[in-house]
Amino acid sequence: MAKIKGAIVIDHDRCKGCNLCVVACPLNLLSLAEKEVNKKGYRFAQQTVDNVCNGCASCAIVCPDGCITVYKKKEN
């Protein structure tokens, strides 16, 4: 049986650090950068846990700036 995995892509330069995606992720895979800022001076969202995303796209749905894209892929 194939298992669905997700891949999260975040456009760090467009992110304004609103933290909505961090709160929305049911698997707690995201966090705001602690010491880094993007070109606009915001702490940006980043994925902190790899290979666990289930592709639910909750993070992308709540992102007001459309900075997050979630890809789904099947793994055997």
Image: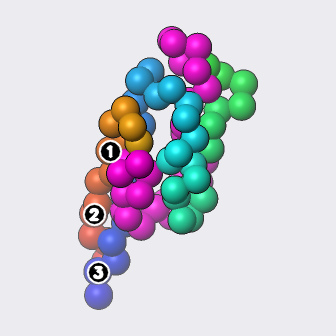
What amino acid does circle 1 point to? Answer: Thr
Residue 57 covered by magenta stretch: yes
Q: Nearer the viewer, mark 1 or mark 2?
A: 1
The overriding secondary structure of the stretch rendered in magenta is: loop
Reply above or below: 40 against 71: above
Residue at image mark 1: 69
Whether residue 76 can be seen here: yes
Classify mark 1: helix, strand or loop.
strand
**Disc 2 marks which amino acid?**
Lys
**Residue at 29 percent of width and 80 percent of height:** 2
* Mark sitting on residue 73: 2
| Residue occupying image coordinates x 63% and y 37% | 32
Residue 54 image point, x, y percent: 42, 67
Which label lies toward us, 1 or 3? Answer: 1
Range of residues picked out in magenta: 38-62
Q: Residues within 10 Å of mark 3 (few under 14, many from 20)?
A: few
Query: Helix or strand or loop: what does disc 2 sit on?
Result: strand
Decide: marks 1, 2 in contact (CB < 8 A)? Answer: no
Horizontal side, residue 14 vs residue 24: left or right: left
69 or 52, nearer to the observer: 69
Q: For the residue labelled by badge 3, is the local secondary structure a helix, a strand or a loop?
A: loop
Does 53 appear in magenta? yes
Q: CA distance from mark 1 to mark 3?
A: 22 Å
Q: Where is residue 58 shown, x and y percent of the image?
A: 41, 58
From the top left corner, tell me how far across and down residue 13 is, in percent: 44, 21
Position of the N terminus by quadrant: bottom left
Q: Is residue 75 above or below residue 48?
A: below
Quadrant containing the C terminus is bottom left
Find disc 3 in the rendering and name its residue: 2
